[in-house]
Image: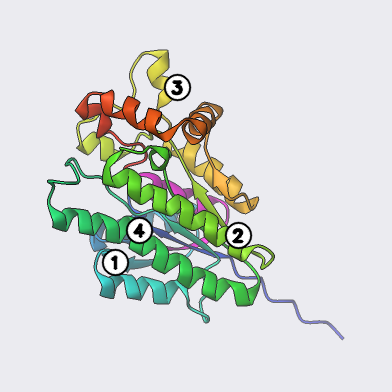
Amino acid sequence: MTSATPPRPARPTALVTGATAGLGAGFARSLARRGHDLVIVARDAERLDSTAAALRAEHGVGVEVLAADLSVRADLDRVAQRVGSVEAPVDVLVNNAGFGLKQRFFDGDPADHERMFDVLCRAVMVLSRAAAGAMVPRGRGRVLNVGSVAGLVPGGGHYSAAKAYVIVLTETLAGELRGTGVTATVVEPGYVRTEFHARSGMRSGGSSSLSNRIWLDIDEVVDAALDDTFAGRVVSVPTRRWKAVSTLLDVAPRRLVSTVWNAMPSGARRRHPTQR
């Protein structure tokens, strides 16, 4: 009697927010190369469709698109429902969506700052909780939140405050998940060459060796972050040079860090790492 051929195991699925540009697009490409089907989330439906078509053609993976503005609560709830699906489980969540503001906190547009909070903080909270709630009963899963070295800088504006929240939330979640088979990781990159900087007219490196050492390429950040995520590490800081900066910012007196930061030219202060 011939035994039946066992069914081919399904590919794991990763959901990436802000997946059509910058780091998000890099995460989607790398996860597809690593054999994951994808759910990609962004606001622009047309760009989502073209990104999905390119990923399918290049990597032969399944790609589901989900158009959503994470600052809109109804949209965020739809994404959270997809993250928490039992019938179509998400194995890896990458909370990447984000943006920066070229305005001060105290006299900027309140609506802009509220939207930043909703995307950079509230969405990360809601989606991380939805993912953990679905993953823990299965005994497996990965949550990767995109933070920033800026989150270690007091005086770095609302962006730094939001990234500090992401760092502490992820570290808290990782502690709660210990022993469940589910992990949480926060990546804290420095300056990354993305289209955010191009749109903002910001220089992202030049001919000097110092400039080239400061700026990171997207794939450099993405590969380090995913390697650390699948290794179960809580904090990922890509490259030795930025690990050194992160360590210094972590141990230096906060008042000193704030004084040095505020002594920089205002334009430089607004050039937060990892804006995308």
The circle drawn on residue 175 is: 2
Residue 57 lies, in percent from the top left, at 43, 55
Residue closer to the observer: 216 or 236 = 236
Q: Spatial distance from mark 2 to mark 1, Cα to Cα?
A: 32 Å
Answer with mark 2 or mark 1, whichever residue precedes in sequence: 1
Structural crowding at the residue carrying mark 3, measured as other residues with C-alpha within 10 Å and reported as few (<14), some (14–19) or many (≥20):
few
Query: Would you place residue 233 above or below residue 136 in this image?
Result: above
Residue 131 lies, in percent from the top left, at 50, 69
In the image, what residue type sits under mark 1?
Answer: Ala
Whether residue 73 is in magenta: the answer is no
Query: Would you place residue 146 above or below residue 242 in this image?
Result: below
Residue 241 lies, in percent from the top left, at 51, 26
Structural crowding at the residue carrying mark 2, measured as other residues with C-alpha within 10 Å and reported as few (<14), some (14–19) or many (≥20):
few
Task: Determine which residue is flagged by label 1.
Answer: 67
- Magenta-tinted stretch: 22-39
Q: Quadrant of the N terminus?
A: bottom right
Residue closer to the observer: 100 or 46 = 100
Q: Spatial distance from mark 2 to mark 3, Cα to Cα?
A: 33 Å
Do the residues bearing badges 3 and 1 touch, measured as CB atoms within 8 Å? no
Answer with mark 3 or mark 1, whichever residue precedes in sequence: 1
- SS of the residue at dot 1? strand
Residue closer to the observer: 31 or 142 = 142
Task: Determine which residue is flagged by label 4.
Answer: 121
The label nearer to you, 3 versus 4, is 4
Answer with mark 2 or mark 3, whichever residue precedes in sequence: 2
- SS of the residue at dot 2? helix
- SS of the residue at dot 3? helix
Query: Which SS does the magenta portion mostly show?
Result: helix
Taking 146 as reference, is 90 left or right? Answer: right
Residue with the most extreme bottom position: 1
The circle drawn on residue 213 is: 3
Q: Residue at x 35, y 58 (%)?
A: 121
